Amino acid sequence: MVSDSGEVEKSFRFLLYSRALRSIGIIYMTITMPLYLAAMGLSVVSIGFVVAGVMLFMIVETLALGALGDRAGYKYSLLISEIIPAFGALVIFFSQNVPVIIAAVIVAGIGGAAGGMRGGFSPGSTAIVASNYPDEHKRVNKLGQITSIASFFSIFGAALVSAHFYLSSELGTLAAYRAGFLISSLLLFLSFACLLFIKEEKRPRKSTRIMKGSSFRYILKVIAANSLGGIGLGLAIPLLPLWLELSYKATTLEIGIIFGFSYLVTALGAYYASYMHGRFDPLSIASLTRVLGGALLIAMALSPFLILVAVVYLFRAFFAGLGNPTRNAVNMRGIDREDYGTATSFQGVSTRISQLSSGASGYLMEYSLPAPLFLGGAFQIVSGIMYRYLIGKKKQ
């Protein structure tokens, strides 16, 4: 750790390099995971349970890395959370054994939302930004940069998905998927190398075993609202690529194009987030964008055509990019500096627990294909309303 703010500022670019590389690999793996498992013969219900297994493993990992970050440094949390999926993708490339692949998917944490923020944030990333930049406007700016860079480079991850459409004719469907996992693994190892150059500001020593009471009381409010949103995400998003394939016979080329454009508009939303901070109430932006995201999920569920679904999803991606940096900054308002790692871990764990609803997503899709998005959108709307009500306007 260092106390030179200039050195910390210079090292921030390495975090951006890392997030760019990570996004390409993570996005490819997140989008193709349900498609790859389906191509190997797993049912929709089974894939839903695999995603739930991913969430369970990530709960343990997130808690452990958050506690480690508060004590040893958030840089180490970032490094560990990067190296695990890098090796997991490598195992998926080399293995053709279904149980081994499922285990690698779970341990690597491959699953969840395939949005533009997916590659930008991992255990320790929000905490290190909050620790290095005490000013909230500066935090929103840095988180916005991370989201913008991650979302923009996620386009290349989506392009890699689309490339499968052409590679499969030469290599075969499964071999083409595995080739993408090899490329993703190499990118994650490069991302790990970039993280080695990150610097941290000195922080106060940890004075409590878990966190201070004031931090805990604030984080409970955030968790209560985010858990509802997490249920909605778990129902609607992890199996979205497979939903597109089953509902509209979408090819990997079309799925890659849809997600690719969504990452572009997410990057635009994140870019404008820092400009809106200070001009509008941050809490209102955080709440409203989540409500709109839920409403647009319902609109997707009711859309009769793939092109209409794609357009609606683009609007949702823009609001996600606009709201995420602001929401992350608001989430840190009432937390003590020594508790950033543990507090963000608690937030992450609450979201992962609620996203265990992905296990029900497979069942809902067998019953009615629009059902997961319709119910997921309803939970997100309620979450956005509760977020404003619970956090309140008081800036801590």
Image (cartoon, rainbow, N blue to C red):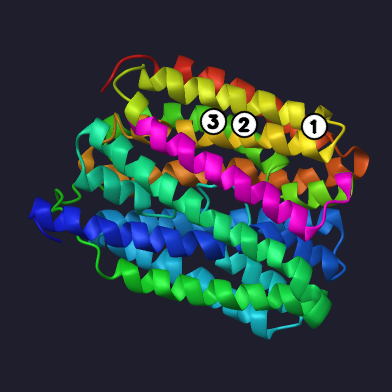
As displayed, is residue 201 above or below residue 364?
A: below
Work out how far the residue at label 2 is from the one at label 1, CA to CA, in angstroms. 14 Å
Relative vertical location of residue 173 with respect to residue 366 in this rendering, above or below: below
Depth check: give the residue in front, 380 or 188.
Answer: 188
Residue 46 falls left or right of residue 60: right
**Residue lying farthest to the bottom in this orientation:** 94
Q: CA distance from mark 3 to mark 2?
A: 6 Å
**Which quarter of the rendering shows the N terminus?**
bottom left
- What's the residue type where badge 1 is placed? Ala
Q: Amino acid at mark 3?
A: Phe
28 on left or right of 204: right
Height in image: 2 above or below 93?
above
Mark 1 is surrounded, within 10 Å at the Cα level, by few (under 14), some (14 to 19) or many (20 or more) other residues, namely many
For marks 3 and 1, give the one nearer the viewer: 3
Crowding near pointer 2: few (<14 within 10 Å), some, many (20+)?
some
SS type, badge 2 = helix
Of pointers 3 and 1, the one earlier in the residue sequence:
1
Q: Is residue 103 left or right of residue 5?
A: right
Query: Mark on residue 315?
Result: 2
Q: In this figure, which residue is indicated by the disc labeled 1?
A: 301
Give the residues in magenta.
248-274
Q: Is residue 53 above or below residue 178?
A: above
In the picture of the structure, the residue carrying the numbered disc 3 is: 319
- Residue kind at label 2, given as amino acid type: Phe
